[in-house]
C-alpha cells in the first residue's frame, strides 16, 4: 500500500468533507486529491529524484507529500530553522531534487548543482493549472516515502528512511477510516520536518478530521486558533503544553471544544501534566512514545489510564503518570542489558522495539538487529503491569558510584519547588564517584531560592545519592527547535566553568 492510497480512499468515500483549513472555506478531500494530481503532473518531467520541503506548514505541505508519492519520489522535509551552512549541506546532499521553500532559502540553494526550486504558493498555482495525467510511477509499498533528518540532540543528524509500508502500517494500526465526525478538527502545530507532523497529518486525514495548521507555535496564538476553529483534537510536545497551561491560567479561559490532546516528543514533567489535567478535566489526554525510526508512536498511555493515575491513592498506579503507557497492539517492546540479553520486569536497560511500522533504517544502512529488533538507545524499564518508563537517552543516565540515576526523577522533584520554572538534571565527571548529579534551574520571574535550599529540597524527598552536587541558575535552558532539552550543551558549559577547566 502507498500513502497516496490513504487519501484516495477517503476522497472516494467523503470527497466533499473539508480536509484542510477553515471549516467554511477550506480545501475538501476531493480538492486535495485533485490538487495533488495536478501537482504530480507538473512535476512529471522534472529530473528531480526527491521532493524537498523547507518551509512552514501550509496546504503545500500535504499537496507536495502526496504529489511526491504519486510520482514515486521520496519526500524530504527539512528544518527551515537551521543556519544557512547546515541547511545548504542537507539540500545539496539530496540532489538532484526539487526544493519547495521561501525565497531566501531558494537563493541559498540557487547555485547548487541538480537543485531546482519553487515557492509553496507557486507550487500550488502550478498544480491548479496543470491537468492530471494519471499516475507516473508504480505504487510500491517498499519504496522510500519520507526521508527525515533525526533531530540531533547529541550530534550530526542522520537521514531516517520511512517506506510506504511503515507509514501505512502505522496509520492503519492506530486510525479507523472516517472515524471522526464532520465537526471534528485537529490542530497541527509541530513542524513538517518532525515525524509527528507527518504522522499527525496522515492519521488526521484518514480519520476524516479537518486539519488546521499553525505554521509557527506561539501559545497565545495556539489557544486563540483552537477556540476560533473549534478544535477538537491536537498534538503538542511537552514544552508546548507547559506554555499552553501558563496561557490558560493567565487568561482564565478554557478550551470548550477540545476533546483529545496527545503529547510526546520528550519527557513530560509530572507537574505540567497534573496542572493540565486539572485545567482541562473534560479532555482525553494521551501520552505517545515513539521515534523517527519507528514511524511515530509505539506506546501510549490512554485517557482512562491518565485519569486513574491522577486520582489514585496507590503510589504504584500514581507513578504511571511518569510512564509512556504500554505498547501498541502490533508492536513489541522489551528491555535488554548492555550485552543484548533480555532482563526481568523492573530492571533497567535499553528499550528494543519491533513491529511492522518500525523502519530502523538510515540512508544506505539498516540498523535492525536479528529478528527485526531496533535498538532505541533509550534507557528505561518496564514494570510488572507492562507500563514503560523511559529515562532518556542512554548517554543521559547518570552513573554515580555504580548506581544508575534517572534525571527525570530528580527533575520532577525540583519542579515541585514553588520558585522553579524549569529544571534539567545531568551527570558530570567526578574522581570519587565517576559521575555526580548536576542541575540547571530556571526560576519563575518572582522566584528566589539558594542552591543549598534546592539541595535540601531534593534530599528531603529522595535518597542522598540523588541530591545535586552542583546547581547552576540559567535564564533559559538550551533546546532544539522541537523543544528537546540539550543536556550535552549544559554539561559542556558547566564543565568548562568548573575550577581547573582548560588547564
Image (tube, helix red, strand yellow):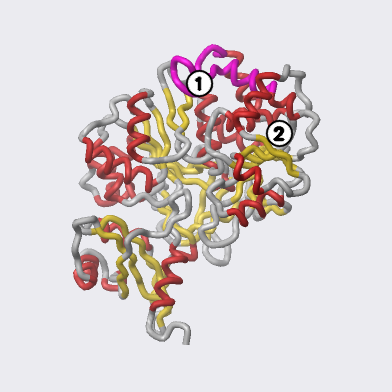
Q: Position of residue 266 (x, y in %)?
A: 43, 50
**Residue 426 sits above or below residue 301 on the image:** below
Residue drawn at x 35%, y 70% as measured from the top left = 438
Residue drawn at x 47%, y 83% as measured from the top left = 502
Residue 1 seen in render = no
Residue drawn at x 32%, y 40% as measured from the top left = 244
Tell me whether circle 2 and circle 1 mark residues in contact (CB < 8 Å).
Answer: no
Residue 63 seen in render = yes
**Residue 52 sits above or below residue 135 on the image:** below
Q: Earlier in the sequence, mark 2 or mark 1?
A: 2
Residue at mark 1: 208
Query: Observer-nearest residue: 165 or 144?
Result: 144
**Residue 36 sits above or below residue 498 on the image:** above
Mark 2 → mark 1, Cα distance in angstroms: 23 Å
Q: Position of residue 326 (x, y in %)?
A: 43, 44
Query: Is residue 428 located in the magenta-colored stretch of the structure?
Result: no
Give the label on residue 141, or none.
Answer: 2
Q: Position of residue 199 (x, y in %)?
A: 54, 36
Q: Residues within 10 Å of mark 1 (few under 14, many from 20)?
A: many
Total number of numbered labels? 2
Q: Which residues are magenta?
A: 14-38
Q: Position of residue 218 (x, y in %)?
A: 38, 41
Determine the secondary structure under disc 2. Answer: loop
Query: Is residue 20 located in the magenta-colored stretch of the structure?
Result: yes
Q: Quadrant of the N terminus?
A: top right
Amino acid at each position: 500500500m502507498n500513502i497516496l492510497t490513504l487519501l484516495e480512499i477517503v476522497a472516494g468515500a467523503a470527497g466533499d468533507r473539508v480536509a484542510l483549513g477553515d471549516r467554511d472555506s477550506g480545501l475538501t478531500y476531493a480538492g486535495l486529491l485533485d490538487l495533488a494530481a495536478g501537482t504530480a503532473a507538473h512535476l512529471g518531467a522534472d529530473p528531480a529524484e526527491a521532493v524537498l520541503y523547507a518551509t512552514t506548514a501550509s496546504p503545500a505541505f500535504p499537496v507536495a507529500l502526496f504529489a511526491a508519492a504519486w510520482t514515486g519520489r521520496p519526500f524530504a522535509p527539512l528544518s527551515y530553522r537551521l543556519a544557512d551552512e547546515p541547511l545548504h549541506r542537507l539540500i545539496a546532499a539530496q540532489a538532484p531534487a526539487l526544493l519547495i521553500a521561501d525565497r531566501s532559502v531558494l537563493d541559498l540553494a540557487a547555485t547548487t548543482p541538480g537543485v531546482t526550486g519553487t515557492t509553496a504558493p507557486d507550487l500550488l498555482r502550478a498544480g491548479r493549472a496543470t491537468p492530471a495525467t494519471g499516475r507516473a510511477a508504480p505504487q510500491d509499498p517498499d519504496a522510500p516515502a519520507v526521508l527525515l533528518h533525526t533531530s540531533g540532540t547529541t550530534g550530526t543528524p542522520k537521514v531516517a528512511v520511512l517506506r510506504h509500508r511503515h507509514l501505512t502500517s502505522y496509520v492503519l494500526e492506530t486510525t479507523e477510516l472516517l472515524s471522526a465526525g464532520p465537526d471534528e478538527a485537529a490542530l497541527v502545530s509541530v513542524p513538517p520536518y518532525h515525524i509527528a507532523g507527518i504522522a499527525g497529518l496522515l492519521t488526521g486525514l484518514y480519520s476524516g478530521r479537518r486539519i488546521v495548521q499553525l505554521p509557527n507555535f506561539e501559545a497565545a496564538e495556539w489557544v486563540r486558533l483552537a477556540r476560533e476553529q473549534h478544535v477538537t483534537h491536537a498534538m503538542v510536545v511537552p514544552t508546548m503544553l507547559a506554555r499552553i497551561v501558563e496561557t490558560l491560567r493567565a487568561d482564565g479561559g478554557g478550551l470548550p471544544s477540545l476533546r483529545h490532546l496527545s503529547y510526546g516528543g520528550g519527557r513530560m514533567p509530572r507537574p505540567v501534566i497534573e496542572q493540565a489535567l486539572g485545567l482541562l478535566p473534560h479532555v482525553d489526554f494521551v501520552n505517545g512514545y515513539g521515534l523517527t525510526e519507528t514511524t511515530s508512536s509505539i506506546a501510549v498511555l490512554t485517557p482512562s489510564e491518565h485519569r486513574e493515575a491522577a486520582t489514585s491513592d496507590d503510589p504504584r498506579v500514581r507513578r504511571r503518570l511518569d510512564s509512556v503507557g504500554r505498547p501498541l497492539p502490533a508492536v513489541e517492546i522489551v528491555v535488554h542489558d548492555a550485552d543484548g540479553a533480555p532482563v526481568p520486569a523492573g530492571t533497567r536497560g535499553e528499550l528494543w522495539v519491533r513491529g511492522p511500522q518500525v523502519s530502523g533504517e538510515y540512508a544506505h544502512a539498516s540498523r535492525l538487529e536479528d529478528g527485526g529488533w531496533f535498538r532505541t538507545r533509550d534507557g528505561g524499564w518496564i514494570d510488572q503491569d507492562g507500563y514503560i518508563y523511559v529515562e532518556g537517552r542512554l548517554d543521559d543516565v547518570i552513573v554515580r558510584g555504580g548506581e544508575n540515576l534517572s534525571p527525570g526523577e530528580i527533575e520532577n522533584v525540583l519542579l515541585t519547588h514553588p520558585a522553579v520554572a524549569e529544571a534539567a538534571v545531568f551527570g558530570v565527571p567526578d574522581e570519587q564517584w565517576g559521575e555526580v548529579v548536576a542541575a540547571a534551574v530556571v526560576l519563575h520571574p518572582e522566584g528566589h531560592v539558594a542552591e543549598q535550599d534546592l539541595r535540601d529540597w531534593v534530599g528531603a524527598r529522595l535518597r542522598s545519592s540523588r541530591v545535586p552536587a552542583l546547581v547552576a541558575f540559567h535564564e533559559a535552558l538550551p533546546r532544539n527547535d522541537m523543544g528537546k532539552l540539550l543536556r550535552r550543551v549544559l554539561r559542556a558549559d558547566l564543565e568548562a566553568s568548573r575550577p581547573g577547566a582548560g588547564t
